Amino acid sequence: MDNNNLVCKTCGHSHFAKGKLEGYATVRPINKFFSFGSALTLTFCKRCGEVAAMKVADPQKF
């Protein structure tokens, strides 16, 4: 996802940032109880915080 071409659907702003959810917010496989899982990477509007995209950082762990 190219941040230069994004326009926020909520406020119309065009400046976005990326952040990462970790810790308890990790994505884990449904059928594996003791898996470490992966962090989530979010692309969000710098003005209002609307999340434009969520992506699993390490999908190969699945």
Image (spheres, helix red, strand yellow):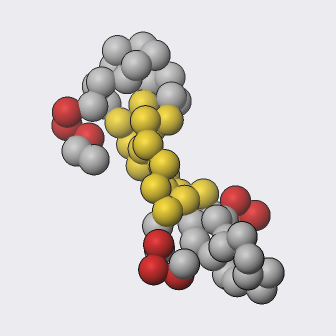
Tell me if residue 22 can be seen. yes
* Whole-percent x, y for residue 3 in the image: 26, 41
Residue shown at the point (52%, 30%) measured from the top left: 49
* Whole-percent x, y for residue 4 in the image: 19, 37
Residue shown at the point (47%, 74%) measured from the top left: 58
Q: Is residue 29 left or right of residue 12?
A: right
* Whole-percent x, y for residue 59 in the image: 47, 72
- Quadrant position of residue 44: top left
Residue at far front of view: 31
Residue at far right of view: 33
Residue shown at the point (42%, 49%) measured from the top left: 18
What is the number of callouts on the image?
0
Tell me if residue 46 can be seen. no
- Quadrant position of residue 47: top left
Residue at far bottom of view: 34
* Whole-percent x, y for residue 46 in the image: 42, 31
The C terminus appears in which quarter of the rendering?
Answer: bottom right
Nearer to us in this view, 14 or 61: 61
Q: Is residue 27 above or below residue 7?
A: below
Nearer to us in this view, 18 or 27: 27
Q: Is residue 35 above or below residue 3?
A: below
Q: Is residue 1 left or right of residue 17?
A: left
Residue shown at the point (44%, 43%) measured from the top left: 53
